[in-house]
Amino acid sequence: MRMNLRKAMKQVKGKKMWFAICMVWVSVMAMAQSTAHPRIYVTDQERAVFVKSLESVEWKKELVNTKKERLAKYISYWEKDPEWLVSRLQMNWNTKHDKVFLKGGDFSHSKGKAPVPTVRYSGTRDWATDYERPKLEEVQPYFDDPRGLYLRHKEGGKMEWVHPSRSGFAIDKINEQIMELVADAAFLYWLTGEQKYADFAAPVFFTYMEGMYYRDAPIDLEKSEQANISGLATFEVIHEGIVVSLVTTYDFLYNYFKANKKDLHTSVAVFQKWGDQIIKKGIPDNNWNLFQARFLTYIGLVLEGNQNYKNGKGQEYFLDHTFNISTDRQIAIKESLLVYDQENAMWPECASYSVHVITTFLRIFTLLDHATNANEFANFPIVERAALASFQYLFPSGYTVGFGDSHHKMLPPENFELLVANYRKYGQVEKEKLISGLLSQMVNEGVYDRRAKDFFELFFYTDHLIENHSKEDVNTDKLVSPTFYAPNVSMLNQRMGKGENAVMASIVGSFGNHAHANGISLELYANNYVLGTDMGRGPSYWHDDHRNFYSRFPAHNTVVVDGQSDYAAMRTYFPFKLENVFPKSGERPSFDKVTFSNVSFVEPKTVSDQQRFTAVIASNTKKPYVIDVFRSKKQKGGRQKHEYIYHNLGQSLELFDVKNNPLKTMPTDELSSIKGDLKGYDYFTDKTKTINSGDIRAIFTLKSSESPDNFMKLWVKGSENQTLYKVNSPKSNALSEGTAPKEVLEKPIPTLILKRDEAAWEHPFAVIFNPFMEGEANPIANVSFSSVPEYPNTQIIDVLLNDKTTLDRTVLNASESDVVSKDGFYQKGFLSILRTTHNEADIEFMFLSGMEKFESHGWDIVSSGSPFSFTLEKAPNGYAVSNDKPITINMPLPKEGSQPEIHLFEDGKLVASRKGTTNRNNSGQVVFKLSKSYDKVLITY
């Protein structure tokens, strides 16, 4: 029945989506009857209100004045020389070539003859270059030289002749910069009516448009994938940002053009040509599709109705291809929205790209809604859900996780500004209060400077945010959860604690787009920073540093097998399998002392089984600690090596033995491709090593002028002839000032590597991450590791807390089927964590998960047929209990008090109470049976 209901709900959602598309189409059809300009950002009917707002809204006035001031310099150049700006366009001024040829991702040459100078094509798909892009004042007028470009080298400062393919984005960015000035002038003409702005802009606009009209789309001589993604101006249709400036100019100057009898047929033809190129080229099933759709939206909105053009390619045509019609290279918005995980609203790409996709969707619907006034956000609710779900990407500092090609950054305030604008427009007061209050708080905290950068903010942001709300109004706690699992990017986040005591572990596999080859990787936040950082992406996706290091195993906190673990990065399909998790993703149970995950993975290059268990556990201070147990073995067995890699912020890494004696390390030439390892190992520097079989302690120290010393202490399980390496890794490109102190942003990352020359399954890597700050108590006094020889899959970890009387014992098996038995302790199941004090029989808390049967300290908890999770925490006059499956609880008879009684709660309300019965097989135990799951149960006596 549940499956049928879910299917019915999907059908209803589908009908709602189709109804929304139909409503959009009706609105667009009506809109297409209007020929008034401008209309993209603003209309003449809205002009008076806008002008009035400039008198009282300081940030709007500031942007307009900035645009005026920036243009003043170039207008003065133009007044002295009317060709000053137009001559700096990057054009085939002399050759007038109309055909462009590429060799894969690089410009090769151009040829042919057009009646007018044509627009030069970009130099390369790779933005990384050794050469500076000249300022406009440095650009030579009417430059067109067969020797290439004449550019300054970034290092030596020497001017050199450079083939366009080595120039990065210099050509197209110069043209974009010029057209941004032209668009600003067009806007100021509309705003002020001063003709100088229109006279300044028009010649540049028409020169460019005529040059693009007579120049063909590029041809890839290698017939590679490049042929399917090239734009008219750049190597990727998603980089055709100049379209926005061209559309903006056309829209604001349309009436000027008409008044001066300018022929607009060429301009219209170029917009149609550009739209066709975007529809025919690109990548249909990732972020590209949306960036393409945004450009199509601009083109569609600025054109008139289909009936105005012989080819029928007007407003309806391009908006229909944006929202309704899918082609091989351009999937319609209505289908693109289905790419989202419909349950958790996650987009299947790394965090940085995912939040950018949200921005793009919001921009598209904001533009459309300005034209239709049909509350398009409500027609497509998944976009609003995605914007709010993006909080799950955040570390406690408010910066996004760094997996894949991501960078630690704040969520774009623009996403929430556009939501607020929509809420204001359609009277959704409560929603506006929440999100507007959040933005106000960001402004007050100095993390968001509310300024307009361009037209989108100028015309679509609300003039003023709602301020002075209580903390409850801006509380975002409900937008994040203790655990969050996004299967479509293979990401699981675990959180615990608040403020300076917050700890977060982010575990990722490799799934979706812009993913790395990283196995099961860990990113760890503590002490206000992402101490166990990911390394981010390289200088560009085509750069050797990215391909050999940043996107590969050695750059991640993971385990490498035989020095060879690898697979394809970027779009890849190697997710981990989530075996166990507590609490369930998105849930907020009453028991808050433990979060954990257990994930498995088959490393494909070496065909190795891997499993990572990560638990965040509350200490008896406010600072949690983290247990990380990583198992790894080759399926074929035999000779093998496994290397546990961990990168941590800091200026130093020190190693100590179990007696706290410093361990001396010696220089080594190991960890290199010469020795048979991945090329990524060659990026490790300052390599030293030591061999030690015992437990060790490693301390990373991070010093900053702005805070006390920051320590990450690792308690590491020993293993026979384990090799310990201290190395430096290259700088992390994921870091930002919100996730690391400025002293280490551009510095190498100290790295610890543990090597086993045998399988690491029965003797896994086991590490306790113990963060603390100088001047505060370290929550951990000691850690010891043990095992039970008769039960090789069992690991026992004892953590003695800083009061030296409280002990946390974690018993971890490799699976729910494993068994361990010793000295009155029995566990058939995956995990148990017990906190005891003074070794008393009475326990502070008990946590069980993936359990079939558990016996300890007089307790005996038994499943009713399937593995369960169970929590027990000491409470006044008894215990607070929760369970997720039917179980039988056999509890020890209390030494004091009355016969134990159980109280069952549902939705916070007491629903039943009863006394326990004596266990007929053990008179020292009382029995309670729970027939279903309960988040809250009280046992009192």
Image (cartoon, grey):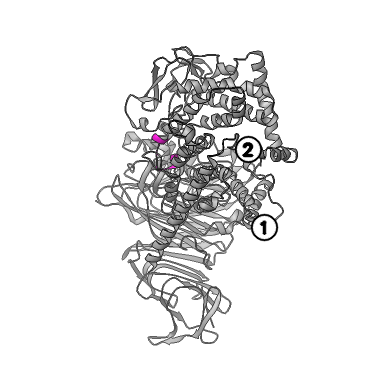
Residue interval drawn in magenta:
279-289
Q: From the image, which quarter does the N terminus lie in?
A: bottom left
Tag 2: amino acid: Thr
Q: Residue 853 vs residue 382: left or right?
A: left
Pick the residue in front: 240 or 931. 240
Q: Secondary structure at mark 2?
A: loop
What is the x, y in percent for residue 898? 54, 87
Kind of residue at badge 1: Lys
- Location of mark 1 (residue): 471
Q: Is residue 425 above or below residue 34?
A: below
First-in-chain label (1 vs 2): 2
Q: Are marks 1 and 2 in contact (CB under 8 Å)?
A: no
Q: Is residue 462 left or right of residue 903?
A: right
- Viewer-nearest residue: 643 or 302: 302
Q: Nearer the viewer, residue 266 or 785?
A: 266
Q: Residue at x 70, y 35 (%)?
A: 62
Q: Is residue 694 magenta?
A: no
**Mark 2 highlights which residue?**
43
